[in-house]
Image (tube, rainbow, N blue to C red):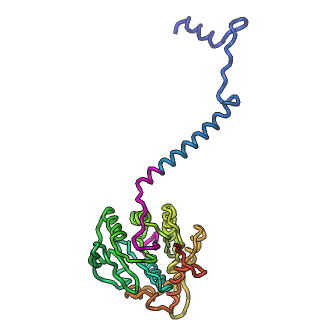
Amino acid sequence: MGAPAWRWALRAARGPVGGGRAAAAPRRLPGCGAAACAAPLADAASSSSRDEALRDRRARILSRGLPKQKPIDGVKQVVVVASGKGGVGKSTTAVNTALALAANDSTKEVGLLDADIYGPSIPKMMNLKGNPELTPKNLMRPLKNYGIACMSMGFLMEETAPVVWRGLMVMSAVEKLLRQVDWGQLDYLVIDMPPGTGDVQLSVSQNIPIAGAVIVSTPQDVALLDACKGAEMFRKVHVPVLGLVQNMSVFQCPKCKHKTHIFGADGVRDLAKTLGLDILGDIPLHVNIRETCDSGQPVVVSQPQSDAKKCHYITCNHQDGSYPMHS
């Protein structure tokens, strides 16, 4: 810069002196004055309303892609028995729960659907084999034993054949089990769900109206983590959670009668309190329960006077003796 430019910069920095021109009015800083103070509040309110409108718009867009729930023909109420983790006795509980529902009221018709495509166990537990017959409308007729109408992927393939399918094929199989079965007239359909919170659980929950879900878990901490996730999943898809079943809660030595909490004590009860849910049953780790299911003679029908059977009755009733499923 030359000398004239430096002199101009110094004069500008000093500003007018003495009788020079009047100084320019000071600029109002942001945040001064009542109007300026109100502006941030208005902006915040506007932003909140925009966010709410955006959330509503997203919800409407997402809902367009969801299938509309359609009841299963002839089925009044659907109850799903689920678990976050495998190996906690979910299928055993589902089988004995269906049998207990029928035993509680002989006027009620009960069905059992095995939705565990990869590991169907209902055929063995219910002592059923063979392929379903087809009706004139090309619907599959369930196989029946102990008065319970049963349908499973295990009826449609060899007992030892693995199901090596991707998700789309599994979803197609679930859809067929839900819609292409002639259930007749059922008061209750108990669905034995696969473990976890994946495609099958979402597909079943979004396609059919469900009266309620029963979550089965052992008191072990690892199992409780997944049981909590399972309960929260059903809440997110607006399926009522009827309560929790604490399975394998205690082992009693048949000789000395000493009780051992192999998987921990009262873990499921503590989780139920945390989630604000009921405890529907407390089932011991008993050899009779395992043996009777393995032999295809579940304990509810093979040993009707046993304590193990009474435990499964609790899973179907509240303390006042009423059903937890409502019309």
- Residue, far right: 18
- Residue, far front: 136
Is residue 114 at least partly visible in the picture? yes
- Residue, far bottom: 255
Which residue is found at the position 46% from the left and 87% from the top? 300
Using the image, determine if residue 256 lies above or below residue 215.
below
Please tell me whether residue 84 belongs to the stretch shown in magenta.
yes
- Residue 143: image x %, image y %? 34, 81
Highlighted magenta segment, given as a residue range: 60-87
Which residue is found at the position 29% from the left and 66% from the top? 165
* Side (left or right) of 147 relative to 162: right
- Residue 52: image x %, image y %? 55, 46
Please tell me whether residue 177 belongs to the stretch shown in magenta.
no
Using the image, determine if residue 115 lies above or below residue 289.
above
Please name whichever residue, 166 or 58, is drawn nearer the observer in this view of the structure: 58
Is residue 89 at least partly visible in the picture? no
